[in-house]
Amino acid sequence: MTTSTLFLPEQRTLLKQVSWKTFINLLTDLGNNRSARLYYDQGVLEIMTPLGEHENNNRFIDDLIRAIADELNLNLKKMGSLTLKREEVLKGAEPDSCYYLENESLVRNQQNIDLVSDPPPDLVLEIDITSSSLDKRPIYAAFGVPELWRYNGRKLEVFILDKTTQSYQQVTQSLHFPWLPLEIIPQYIRQSLIDGETATLKAFRSFVRQFIPC
């Protein structure tokens, strides 16, 4: 095994030549009561522990998405850092946050998700301030996640799954919230550091209300 570690807004450890069995055993041994998140792609394992800036951005964007759902009366199931895995493609991930929107009714009463029988989340959020060594896009593409958001501390990037190529294409418009200017999310994050999160969320809700269908 070889390792490399970064210590910034996230602490990351990269391991190579890790078997699927080892990955599953780690998930079991670490349990659910932990902050570290695991990502696995065909023998490469990344262990990421979020620190203050990372987790603050994650939680605040999560609040913004919840505000959108509330104001537009969208059924939303928030699954947090849900463990997603598929042995047949040797891939696994625990996103910062993930959501069911179109498929919310299919998983509404479920506490656990099995990608063998359940649909993948409709939207996944990744905070990647330190530029992870492991590209998460092939993992989520293999799961069939339609939309991926990646926030690097300055800019929100949105990727939509091309079902023909089974790969992500970066876009300028969200699949689920096409009316939402992508630069708005970083703007409200910066505003929250000045005005506070409560006041900023109230302002964001007012912004969203203009898009309520008449």
Image (tube, rainbow, N blue to C red):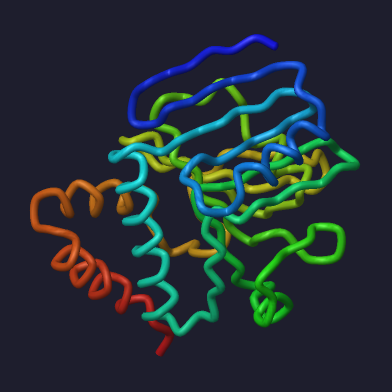
Above or below, comparing residue 157 to residue 47 in the picture: below
Residue 45 image position (x, y, % from top left): 67, 27
Question: Is 186 left, or right, of 100 in this rendering?
Answer: left
Residue 191 image position (x, y, % from top left): 16, 52
Front residue of 68/7: it is: 7
Question: Is 69 left, or right, of 198 in this rendering?
Answer: right
Farthest residue, direction left: 195
Above or below, comparing residue 6 to residue 73 in the picture: above
Farthest residue, direction front: 29
Residue 43 image position (x, y, % from top left): 77, 24
Q: Report which quarter residue 115 is drawn in.
A: bottom right
Residue at position x 29%, y 46% from top? 186
Residue at position x 32%, y 56% from top? 60
Farthest residue, direction right: 88
Residue 46 image position (x, y, % from top left): 60, 28
Residue at position x 25%, y 67% from top? 204
Quarter containing the N terminus = top right
Question: Is 102 left, or right, of 189 in this rendering?
Answer: right
Front residue of 108/21: it is: 21
Quarter containing the C terminus = bottom left
Residue at position x 46%, y 45% from top? 35
Above or below, comparing residue 101 to residue 26 in the picture: below
Farthest residue, direction bottom: 214
Q: Report which quarter residue 53 is drawn in.
A: top left
